[in-house]
Amino acid sequence: MNRWLGLVGLLVVAAAALALRLPSLDRRPLHNDEAVNAVKFSALWETGRYAYDPEEYHGPALHYATLPFVALSGARSTSDLSDTRLRLAPVFFGTALVLLLALFADGLSWRATIFAGLLTAISPAMVFYSRYFIHETLLVFFTTLTIAAGWRWWSLRKLSWAMLAGAALGLMYATKETFVIPLAAMVAATALTGGWCRNEEAGQPWLGSVRERALAFMVAAWKPLLVALAVAVAVSLVLFTSFFTNWQGPLDSIKSYLPWLNRAGGQSPHLHPWSFYLERLLWFHQPRGPVGSEGLIVVLAVAGAIRGFTGGGSVGINRNLVRWLAYYTVALTAAYSLIPYKTTWCLLGFWQPMILLAGVGAVAALEAVRSRWAKIAVAALLLAAAGQLAWQAYRASYLLASDWRNPYTYSQTRPNVHELVARVQGLAQVHPDGQAMVVKVMVPESYWPLPWYLRQLARVGWWDALPDDPYAPVVIASVRLGAALDEKSGKKWIAAGAYELRPGVYLELFVEFELWKRFVATLARDREE
């Protein structure tokens, strides 16, 4: 397959990726983390400055990347920042990731690259988190760009590719602190691949080969590595200093690793067993729910890795690159699995290189049969399996977008949060103080994303327990607190509804009785009109 035909194929696949990612971005309410990111972005949107916090949150790359998309969408103020507008940047990078794979075509072949692009486009995990206003999709994009540019430099020895790899590495750093995990896996994969090659060529002891190859690589490549590192530092400095307005930012980005390391191994509701990610990817089935499985990708990835380590070679496939990807994928999968602190979206880190190996595995499957009809049958089987993955992606991102039976939802906000917010806004419209109406929210669990959705109200208070004076025109309280303001107030407040914020977190809405009567009267007038 020639380059132009390959590029056209990737463009078609990228169009399919966009079609799966872009529609109905507001179908799922913002997750806790998305809402926190929205607040951080709104500060950047209003002030033009991002102050990095070493204790919480992540790097500034997501927020700066979101700026042009929000501006082009026509937003003029924070009140215009809809769920859809905030999620446009991850959609873009999730789609662009497909096109980025073209940089691997001379090492994986165009056939393998297009199939890897197809799997990237339709993988339920890749689609679901490309519609999420969090850092992970951008981290995967910049990580893949670092690897691709590094591969191009290794193949062509042009300094421009080393500089691009350095810029991508700097963007990884400015995206999320966990960039150190794929970076360490890259170093390990490079050393192991070099050791394998030298052992294969000279029959030397394997561990000795690793050391010698690593030293030889450093001697041969120290100049471009130094240039790449300088570019990485420059790019990260620009972002962490908020374009040279916050010189504390770079120091804070280093200080952040102590709290993050404590969180990774300490007490947390996000501590999970080593199998947490693989269970969601290979076979996920909740009661009364459908089966979710991306096992096809794992099977093909294993076949691709075997092709890299066996004697047989496919036309256009560089076995050293395939071996490197195999080492990298195994190292990264092991690292993410062994770290106790886990959130579902982190699986994207090792899933994308596994998809690259799966592209090679698809080619290996086609080459394993000789007759034309057998190849057609294998190709048809692969496409049918890919179609089933695409259906799972649609089901996860649209039909079960907020459902606990979805493998990729994680402490997901329930859809009726919009009903609660609309009700509070309706009450504010009939209150004499309007948007300055006092609202008290009392939730010992995390109350996010309510602070974001109630941002237009000027006087909202937040408690993790019942205060001495819990009364306000509108009160939102966790059922765990047993507020019972209707009974305690002698019906001067009434219970106006119950809402599920997220699985297991239930809220009660209490409204001052006179305010409730005015609100109900407006509903009656609306029905009459």
Image (cartoon, grey):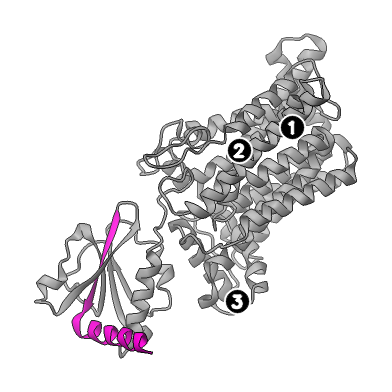
CB atoms of marks 3 and 2 within 8 Å: no
Q: Which mark is residue 351?
A: 2
Residue, x 55% and y 47% (percent of image)?
177
Q: Which residues are magenta?
A: 505-529
CB atoms of marks 2 and 1 within 8 Å: no
Discs 2/1, front: 1
- Neighbor class of circle 2 (other Cα within 10 Å; few <14, some 14-19, many 20+) is many
Q: Which mark is residue 162?
A: none
Residue holding disc 3: 75
Kind of residue at disc 3:
Ala
- Neighbor class of circle 3 (other Cα within 10 Å; few <14, some 14-19, many 20+) is some
Asked if residue 498 is positioned above or below residue 314 in the image, the reply reads: below
Q: Earlier in the sequence, mark 3 or mark 1?
A: 3
Q: Secondary structure at mark 1?
A: helix
Q: Which quadrant would residue 454 be assigned to in this image?
A: bottom left
Residue 111 in picture, x, y percent from top left: 80, 36
Residue 55 in picture, x, y percent from top left: 45, 54
Q: Is residue 295 left or right of residue 428?
A: right
The CA distance from mark 3 to mark 1 is 46 Å
Q: Is residue 218 left or right of residue 391?
A: right
Residue 422 in picture, x, y percent from top left: 38, 74
The CA distance from mark 2 to mark 1 is 23 Å
Q: Is residue 174 left or right of residue 201?
A: left
517 in magenta: yes
Residue, x 81% and y 46% (percent of image)?
9
Work out whether residue 154 or residue 255 is closer to the camera in this orientation and state it.
154
Residue holding disc 1: 379
Q: Earlier in the sequence, mark 2 or mark 1?
A: 2
Q: Which quadrant would residue 73 be assigned to in this image?
A: bottom right
